[in-house]
Image (cartoon, coloured by chain):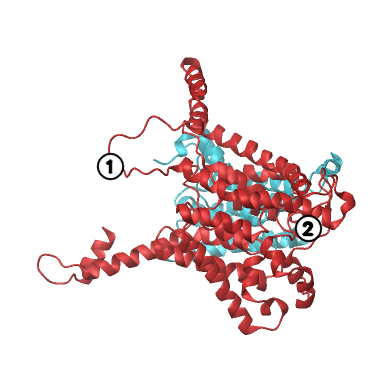
Chain colours: A cyan, B red
């Protein structure tokens, strides 16, 4: 596989959320607004990239029987670091994300990439694979965060779009369902629908 | 009436050649007007006078008493809240006319949006357009408050048809009742328009303003005393339906007329209908035994008269697509709908009405109920089975028979 494919494939054919259906919990939980979605995306990109790199460097020294626990130690160290950085510099977003930063440890994308890729590949491709999957995850998160904040709260990154456009005086109202997690699931489903309609390879027989 | 001219006209405009892609739209209007000439000729079929079109039409006819009464009640509620808001001279017909004019836009939006999407999907997929939406499209405006803004209505109908039905493959494939999906969408997306005291009574003929008018359940969940409740709503009021509520759900008598037609024609399952009332009644009695608050002490039959219980039991729970299919399953399904509806009403102050959520919940569980009933039946019958050797089947044999 060419290195560029490691970045490109997760955007479409190998997307962690819409094709592999990994990391769905956080995708439902943190996308009610755009800002936490972006911050969460960045955190996951950092964690999955660096953990892929570290585990790939260590891969020949890890005994197979304890590999999961070694991976977990690496991932949780990184997650704690990310969590501390968020608490130090973005306290309000960190509060919004609450447990979901900590839960990156259990994010299936991270563990999945470590097991399936970093354990058997060289460091550079592993780093790229982590970046690609992190970005593939981010695309969906940011799309959801954009749609949910726009239609659910009438704002974007806190900026009152609907109010500035004067929609409320026309009788427009925010859609309360959008800020509930079930609607994130439905929107994810719609994205999967759209993706499969465009890409026939993804349709199972 | 001689319809020959219409039939000839249909034959004349049948799309051919470059217009043949319009086939399923044409076919929909043709079968709406005439019984299809082409019937299945091969294979084994039971021939019956009831087809999809006829059963849907019977449901629509069964809805008419509730619809007509609901229209009258819209006018009556506006008039009795404040006669000066009533744009017409007072008469029974004008009360109905007022309600008719209020309901017409809701019904029109529901049908135009819903059928538009149905036609688009059928056209795109090359399917025939299904009659199912004729009932759904009428049900949706009947179970929302009269003051629902039209754009919200359009959005809810689109959501119900696309997410509730078409993504699963269209009529007959959906596991949730589409009309209730539309209502649930409105309930969660625009809660201020769907509950509270200020949505049930239209302030005037046009516009979306509303006058205060509490529903029985609104009064009860606000913790009012039973004497206050009785002074506002008598049993007779609730039976006839002259109370505020969603447009066409208030009159138990009008709903009962529809129920009789549905049961007489066998379109709706009597098992489901009966068991919903049984489940609700049993839950009500259980709460009476606990007692303590007004709601807990409320006689169980009040639950049948208030809100959407009767309407849901007759027209929603019995939807043959989303209900349980096995006879035992229907009993379980109905009992739980009734029980959950009353439980939600009494125990959860956040949701004054529990019928919608309880039917949707049981829609989700119906396939599981059927699965359990069927596998139990298979187990019971394989126990009886003997193979040629004359010995009863061993545990392994049974497992094999079950899996095979």
Answer few, some or many: residues within 10 Å of disc 1's Cα (few below 14, many 20 plus, some between 14 and 19): few
Residue occupying image coordinates x 61% and y 48%: B64
Residue occupying image coordinates x 61% and y 84%: B289
Label annotation for residue B44: 1
* Vertical comparison of B19 with B269: above or below: above
Q: Is residue A102 left or right of residue B88?
A: left
Residue occupying image coordinates x 64% and y 54%: B184
In the picture, the quarter occupied by the C terminus of chain B is bottom left
Q: Nearer the viewer, residue A125 or A190?
A: A190
Same-subunit check for callouts 1 and 2: no
Viewer-side label of 1, 2: 1
Badge 2: chain ID: A
Answer few, some or many: residues within 10 Å of disc 2's Cα (few below 14, many 20 plus, some between 14 and 19): few
Image coordinates of residue B227 in percent, x first then y, are 78, 77
Label annotation for residue A46: none
Q: Nearer the viewer, residue B263 or A84?
A: B263
Image coordinates of residue B351 in percent, x first then y, are 69, 65
Residue A172 sits in quarter: top right
Alpha-carbon distance for marks 1 and 2? 73 Å
Q: Is residue A46 visible?
A: no
Image coordinates of residue A130 in percent, x first then y, are 56, 48
Q: Is residue B171 visible?
A: yes
Badge 1: chain ID: B
* Vertical comparison of B208 with B14: above or below: below
* Vertical comparison of B42 with B301: above or below: above
Image coordinates of residue A135 in percent, x first then y, are 61, 44
Q: Give the residue furthest to the right.
A: B84
- At mark 2, the secondary structure is helix
Q: Circles 1 and 2: CB distance less than 8 Å?
A: no
* Residue placed under numbered mark 2 in the picture: A89
């Amino acid at each position: 596989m060419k290195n560029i494919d490691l970045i490109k494939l997760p955007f479409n054919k190998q997307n962690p959320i819409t094709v592999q259906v990994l990391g769905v919990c956080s995708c439902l939980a943190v996308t009610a607004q755009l800002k936490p979605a972006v911050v969460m995306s960045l955190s996951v990109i950092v964690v999955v990239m660096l953990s892929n790199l570290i585990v790939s460097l260590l891969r020949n020294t890890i005994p197979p029987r304890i590999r999961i626990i070694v991976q977990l130690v690496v991932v949780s160290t990184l997650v704690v670091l990310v969590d501390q950085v968020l608490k130090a510099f973005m306290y309000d977003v960190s509060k919004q994300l609450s447990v979901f930063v900590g839960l990156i440890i259990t994010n299936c994308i991270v563990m999945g990439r470590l097991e399936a890729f970093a354990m058997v590949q060289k460091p550079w491709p592993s780093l790229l694979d982590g970046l690609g999957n992190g970005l593939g995850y981010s695309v969906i998160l940011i799309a959801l965060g954009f749609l949910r904040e726009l239609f659910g709260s009438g704002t974007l990154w806190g900026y009152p779009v609907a109010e500035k456009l004067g929609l409320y005086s026309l009788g427009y109202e925010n859609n309360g369902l959008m800020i509930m997690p079930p609607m994130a699931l439905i929107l994810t489903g719609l994205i999967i629908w759209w993706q499969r309609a465009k890409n026939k390879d993804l349709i199972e027989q | 009436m001689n319809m020959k001219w219409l039939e000839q006209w249909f034959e004349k405009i049948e799309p051919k050649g470059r217009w043949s892609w319009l086939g399923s739209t044409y076919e929909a209007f043709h079968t709406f007007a005439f019984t299809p000439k082409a019937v299945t000729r091969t294979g084994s079929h039971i021939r019956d006078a009831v087809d999809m079109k006829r059963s849907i039409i019977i449901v629509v006819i069964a809805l008419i008493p509730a619809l007509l009464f609901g229209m009258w009640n819209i006018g009556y509620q506006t008039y009795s809240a404040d006669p000066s808001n009533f744009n017409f001279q007072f008469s029974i017909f004008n009360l109905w006319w007022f309600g008719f004019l209020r309901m017409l836009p809701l019904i029109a939006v529901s049908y135009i949006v819903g059928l538009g999407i149905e036609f688009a999907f059928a056209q795109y997929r090359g399917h025939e357009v299904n009659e199912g939406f004729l009932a759904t499209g009428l049900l949706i405006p009947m179970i929302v408050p009269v003051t629902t803004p039209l754009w919200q209505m359009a959005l809810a109908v689109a959501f119900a048809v696309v997410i509730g039905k078409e993504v699963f493959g269209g009529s007959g494939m959906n596991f949730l009742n589409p009309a209730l999906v539309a209502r649930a969408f409105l309930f969660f997306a625009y809660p201020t328009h769907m509950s509270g005291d200020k949505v049930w009574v239209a302030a005037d003929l046009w516009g979306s303003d509303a006058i205060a008018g509490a529903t029985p359940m609104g009064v009860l969940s606000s913790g009012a005393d039973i004497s206050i409740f009785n002074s506002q709503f008598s049993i007779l009021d609730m039976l006839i339906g002259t109370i505020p509520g969603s447009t066409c759900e208030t009159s138990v008598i009008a709903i009962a007329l529809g129920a009789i037609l549905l049961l007489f024609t066998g379109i709706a399952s009597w098992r489901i209908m009966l068991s919903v009332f049984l489940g609700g009644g049993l839950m009500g009695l259980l709460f009476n035994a606990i007692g303590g608050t007004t709601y807990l002490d409320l006689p169980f039959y009040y639950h049948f008269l208030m809100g959407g219980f009767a309407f849901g039991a007759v027209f929603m729970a019995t939807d043959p697509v989303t209900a349980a299919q096995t006879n035992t399953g229907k009993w379980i399904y109905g009992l739980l709908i009734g029980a959950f509806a009353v439980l939600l009403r009494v125990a959860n102050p956040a949701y004054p009405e529990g019928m919608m959520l309880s039917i949707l919940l049981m829609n989700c569980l119906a396939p599981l109920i059927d699965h359990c009933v069927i596998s139990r039946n298979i187990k019971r019958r394989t126990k009886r089975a003997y193979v040629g050797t004359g010995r009863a089947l061993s545990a392994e044999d049974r497992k094999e028979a079950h899996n095979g």
